[in-house]
Amino acid sequence: MHLSFTKMHGAGNDFIVFDRPAGMALPSAEQWRALADRHRGIGFDQAIVFEPARTPDTLAYYRIFNADGSEVEQCGNGARCAVRLLQLQGRAGDGDVTLGSPAGTVRGRIGEGGIISVNMGPPRFDPAALPFVAAAEALSYAIEIDGRNYEIGAVSMGNPHAVLRVADVESAPVEAIGRALQQHARFPKRVNVGFMQIVDASHIRLRVFERGVGETLACGTGICAAVVVGRAQGLLGANVEVHVPGGRLSVNWEGGDAPVWLAGPAAVAFTGQIDF
C-alpha cells in the first residue's frame, strides 16, 4: 500500500493527515500501529483521514485513528490541523471552514499568525453521553482505584473525558492513574484522563493521558474538557489559557449550551510517502 501524507502538529500533539483515494482500503489496526511507531514507522499520536463530504454544507469529512489502531469520535487538535491543511492546499479560504466528523459537524476559523480555532460544540455532562456508569449526573464523582477514592469530573466533548484536580501537575501520577482510569469498568468505551492544576481563574496547567495513545504533549478535547469541568465547578472563567507540555492553547466557553472554542497553532512538520 502506498501512502502520501502530511505530518502536522498542534502544540506537539502530532498527526499524519491524508486523503483517502477512492477504492483505497484503510490500514488495518496492525498497520496503523506500525505506521505510528516512532522508531520503525512515521510516528504520530493520531491519523486524520479525509474522505468526501457527506453533506452539502461541509467541505470534507474526516476520521480519526489512534496510534493503537482504534478509531475514535473526535480530536480537537486534529480538527485544527485538518482546517489548517485545507487552507494551505487552497481548498479552504481564510474565513470559516465547516467539516464533518464522527462526532458531528465541526466549524473552524482561520486567524492570523497560523492560529486556528475550532468550535467543538457544547459539552455534554450526561453520563450516558460518555458513556460513564453513574446513578445520576453530577459535577463530580467518587471513583475507586486500588482501594482509594478519587474525585473526578466527567464530560463528553464528542469523546469521553475524566478530569482530576491536582496540586502539582508535574508530580501527578499520570501514567499509573491515567491507565487505571482508562481501563476502569465504569467507562465501558475507555476514557481520556486529564490532570488539571488551577493556577488562577484564567490559567491552568494540564497533562492528559489519551485513550489509545498514552500521555501526549497536548490533547485538544482534553484541554476543552478540563476547562469545561473547572468552569462548571465555579473555579474558572469563560476564557482560559491552558499550559500543556507542548505549548499553550486557549479555550472559550460561556457556559450552558454555548459551544466550546479551542484556539492555538497548527503547523506542518513535513510531507512524505511510505509503502507498507
Image (tube, rainbow, N blue to C red):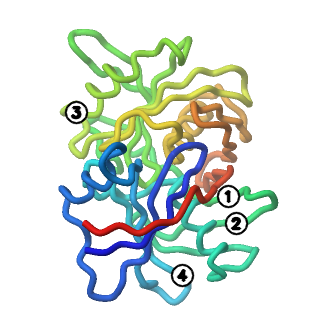
Q: Which of marks 2 and 4 is nearer the N terminus?
A: 4
Q: Residue visible at 71% across and 37% down?
A: 240
Q: Which of marks 1 and 3 is nearer the N terminus?
A: 1
Marks 2 and 4, how far apart in space?
14 Å
Disc 2, SS: strand
Horizontal side, residue 92 vs residue 151: left or right: right
Q: Where is residue 20 in the image (x, y as percent from the top left)?
A: 37, 78
Picture quadrant where residue 232 is located: top right
Q: Measured along the vertical axis of the image, is residue 158 above or below residue 135?
A: below
Proximity of marks 2 and 1: CB atoms separated by less than 8 Å? yes
Q: Where is residue 208 in the image (x, y as percent from the top left)?
A: 46, 33
Disc 2 residue type (three-letter): Arg
Q: Is residue 138 visible?
A: no
The number of numbered discs placed on residues in the rendered structure image is: 4
Task: Kindly identify which residue carries mark 2.
Answer: 109
Task: Kindly identify which residue carries mark 4.
Answer: 58
Q: Earlier in the sequence, mark 3 or mark 2?
A: 2
Q: Can residue 169 be seen in this view?
A: yes
Q: Where is residue 28 in the image (x, y as percent from the top left)?
A: 19, 64
Q: Which of marks 3 and 4 is nearer the N terminus?
A: 4
Proximity of marks 1 and 4: CB atoms separated by less than 8 Å? no
Q: Measured along the vertical axis of the image, is residue 189 above or below residue 179?
A: below
Q: Where is residue 64 in the image (x, y as percent from the top left)?
A: 38, 61
The N terminus is located in which quarter? Answer: bottom left
Marks 3 and 4, how far apart in space?
35 Å
Task: Kindly identify which residue carries mark 1.
Answer: 117
Q: Dot 1 surroundings within 10 Å: few (below 14), some, or many (20 or more)?
A: many
Task: Kindly identify which residue carries mark 3.
Answer: 183
Marks 3 and 2, how far apart in space?
35 Å
Marks 2 and 1, how far apart in space?
5 Å
